[in-house]
Image (spheres, rainbow, N blue to C red):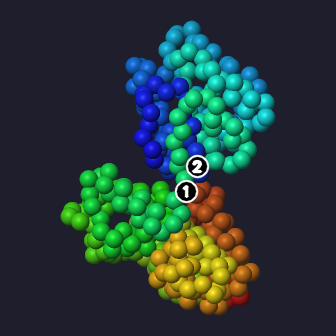
Amino acid sequence: MPPASAAGTAVTVIVGDEELLVERAVHAAVAEAGAASGGTPDVHDVRAADLRPGDLSMLTAPSLFGGGCLVIVRSAQEATKDAAAELASQLAAPPPDVTFVLTHSGAAKNKSLLAGHGGRRIDCPAVKRFGERLDFMRAEFARAGRKADDGGLRALLDAVGNDLRELAAACSQLAADTTGVINHGVVARYYRGRAEATGFTVADRAVEGKLGEALSQLRWALATGVSPVLITSALAQGVRSLGRVGTAARTKGPDTLAADLGMPPWKVDRVRQQLRGWTAEGVARAHAVVAQVDAQVKGEGASPGYALERAVTEIVACRSAG
């Protein structure tokens, strides 16, 4: 992320679709605006899609009690034509004591909002490739005053998966709970001591069609306090990996394919082995199963444990049917 410009910037546009990085940039801009104002500005946090003509004028109107005003407009690419025109006008000449923070995915729609106002721009591109994820984790540990070697970073990526929020949380937890250089052994001991805490063993056994082992691992994980949400996430990533590797060019070697997909080569090899017995239709059905259990675990179902057992059984059935 590029360095911020001088404090007190009236317009900040945050561009990208990496949610964690975008959210961090928004928090930093809000904190900076508060420090620059010397007080606590009125904060209005709105989605661009919800803005109607005239809303911005109402939000930025001077307050009877004085003080500054901070307007956060999220997903500016979703603004209607009229709302985007009003927003562009306000950005070009912000009212006194008003600060704007915009987020924009970088898509073509309403891209004109990203320039023409003299504000600063902060880019938050998606972290997709394997090397980029290692760099992200390395930076997370550095922020915590810790150091991890490549073996530790690779082991953590394998244990946690690709979700940036989960990786950030894992880095923070490891930094707080361990000492010394974080290497492969540290990561292995940490997660083994938590009885396969990420749930990825459950996912591996499920996509391999090993129902008995998958259910046994699931029950053990739940009994030792593993969050059902983490197990659902592991199942989702396991099925998603099947789809990504399965639709990739079969003529490419593991190294080339790994670079294209942002996976380590050994993981590509493992997923290729797990793909045996799967069809495209089976993978599609498994995706639907994961979507359903995700909703149930997050509140729609009465028993997360029962929902997960049923999901594991259905995922294995999707493979068997293929």
Camera sees residue 228:
no
Taking the spot 66% from the left edge, 39% from the top edge, the residue there is 76
Q: Residues within 10 Å of mark 1 (few under 14, many from 20)?
A: some
Taking the spot 33% from the left edge, 74% from the top edge, the residue there is 151
Camera sees residue 143:
yes
Task: Identify the image quadrant of residue 141.
Answer: bottom left
Question: 215 left or right of 192?
Answer: right
Quadrant for the C terminus in the image: bottom right
Q: Nearer the viewer, residue 41 or 312?
A: 41
Number of numbered discs overlaid on the protein picture: 2
Q: Secondary structure at mark 1?
A: loop
Mark 2 and mark 1 residues within 8 Å of each other at the beta carbon: yes
Give, as a three-letter code, the residue at label 1: Ala
Taking the spot 58% from the left edge, 49% from the top edge, the residue there is 16
* Residue at mark 1: 126
* Residue at mark 2: 16
Give, as a three-letter code, the residue at label 2: Gly
Question: 239 left or right of 150?
Answer: right
Q: Secondary structure at mark 2?
A: loop
Task: Identify the image quadrant of residue 194.
Answer: bottom left
Taking the spot 66% from the left edge, 65% from the top edge, the residue there is 291
Say if 223 sits above or below 301 in the image.
below
Question: 216 left or right of 95?
Answer: left
Question: 74 left or right of 9?
Answer: right
How far apart are the alpha carbons under marks 2 and 1?
7 Å
